[in-house]
């Protein structure tokens, strides 16, 4: 865990620069601990880091760094293990998986993804729907959840030239990630389907998501 100053009242905590379940659980663990801490103004978790904004009337850079390091040396491992156990239990029981009904007939790039990976369209759909994804980050617009990781057999690079408009509800793949466009937007992801799912505010870092064919 590496801590770096960002501004007079914020720091960013970096974990191993890797998109993995282990790092995501570490991000969740720190996020959970910080939510219980007095004087924390804002927390922004991402793939491998957590941006922490704090009340300067309570902390300075030295003191917030000491607090964060105490988590790493103290309760952090315990909280991380508790989160790991809870999410493992959840995935086995299918209790907290957000299901996304997806129409794969309404697509722009499904054939492109299939050709790029030497697969049939049905094989792409099967591989996309059989995977259970985690929410690793939320951005570049409100409700845009970065879901990882797709099966390596269907990983496909972004488009060379982004489209000016991608319709809301488009289900897409870019490299090893998949996502849903929560509103009309420009973008360069490969569109493989569409959904009427609209509860984008449900998404939180660490959630489980699965696409189902309709």
Image: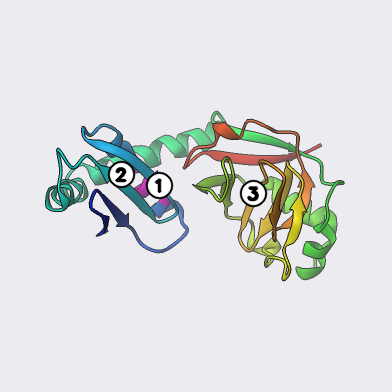
Q: Main secondary structure of the magenta part?
A: helix
Question: Which numbered disc, 2 or 1, marks the residue that appears first in the sequence?
Answer: 2
At horizontal 30% and vertical 55% (from top left) the residue drawn is 13
Residue that carries the numbered disc 2 in the rendered image: 30
Question: Which numbered disc, 3 or 1, marks the residue that appears first in the sequence?
Answer: 1
Q: Secondary structure at mark 2?
A: helix
Asked if the residue under mark 1 is in contact with the one under mark 2, i.e. CB atoms within 8 Å, the reply is yes
At horizontal 64% and vertical 49% (from top left) the residue drawn is 179
9 lies above or below 37: below
Q: Mark 2 packing: few (<14 Cα in 10 Å), some, or many (20+)?
A: many
Q: Position of residue 104 (x, y in %)?
A: 82, 46
- The label shown at residue 179 is 3
Query: Which residues, given as a range, are shown in magenta?
Result: 24-30
At horizontal 67% and vertical 67% (from top left) the residue drawn is 157
What colouring style does the render use?
rainbow
Q: Is residue 82 visible?
A: yes
32 lies above or below 152: above
Q: Secondary structure at mark 3?
A: strand
Question: Which numbered disc, 2 or 3, marks the residue that appears first in the sequence?
Answer: 2
Q: Mark 1 packing: few (<14 Cα in 10 Å), some, or many (20+)?
A: many
Residue that carries the numbered disc 1 in the rendered image: 45
Q: Position of residue 93 (x, y in %)?
A: 54, 31
């Amino acid at each position: 865990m590496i801590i770096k100053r960002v501004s007079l009242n914020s720091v960013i905590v970096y974990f191993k620069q890797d998109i993995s379940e282990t790092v995501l659980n570490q991000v969740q663990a720190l996020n959970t601990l910080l939510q219980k801490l007095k004087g924390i103004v804002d927390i922004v978790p991402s793939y491998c880091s957590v941006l922490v904004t704090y009340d300067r009337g309570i902390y300075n850079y030295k003191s917030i760094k000491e607090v964060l390091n105490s988590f790493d040396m103290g309760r952090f491992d315990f909280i991380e293990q508790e989160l790991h156990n809870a999410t493992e239990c959840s995935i086995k029981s299918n209790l907290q998986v957000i299901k996304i009904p997806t129409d794969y007939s309404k697509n722009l790039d499904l054939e492109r993804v299939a050709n790029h990976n030497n697969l049939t369209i049905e094989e792409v759909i099967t591989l996309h729907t059989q995977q259970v994804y985690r929410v690793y980050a939320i951005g570049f617009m409100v409700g845009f959840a970065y879901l990882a990781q797709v099966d390596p057999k269907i990983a496909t690079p972004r488009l060379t030239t982004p489209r000016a408009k991608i319709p809301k509800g488009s289900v897409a793949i870019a490299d090893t990630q998949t996502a849903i466009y929560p509103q009309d937007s420009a973008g360069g992801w490969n569109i493989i389907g569409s959904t009427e799912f609209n509860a984008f505010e449900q998404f939180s870092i660490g959630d489980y998501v699965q696409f189902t064919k309709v």
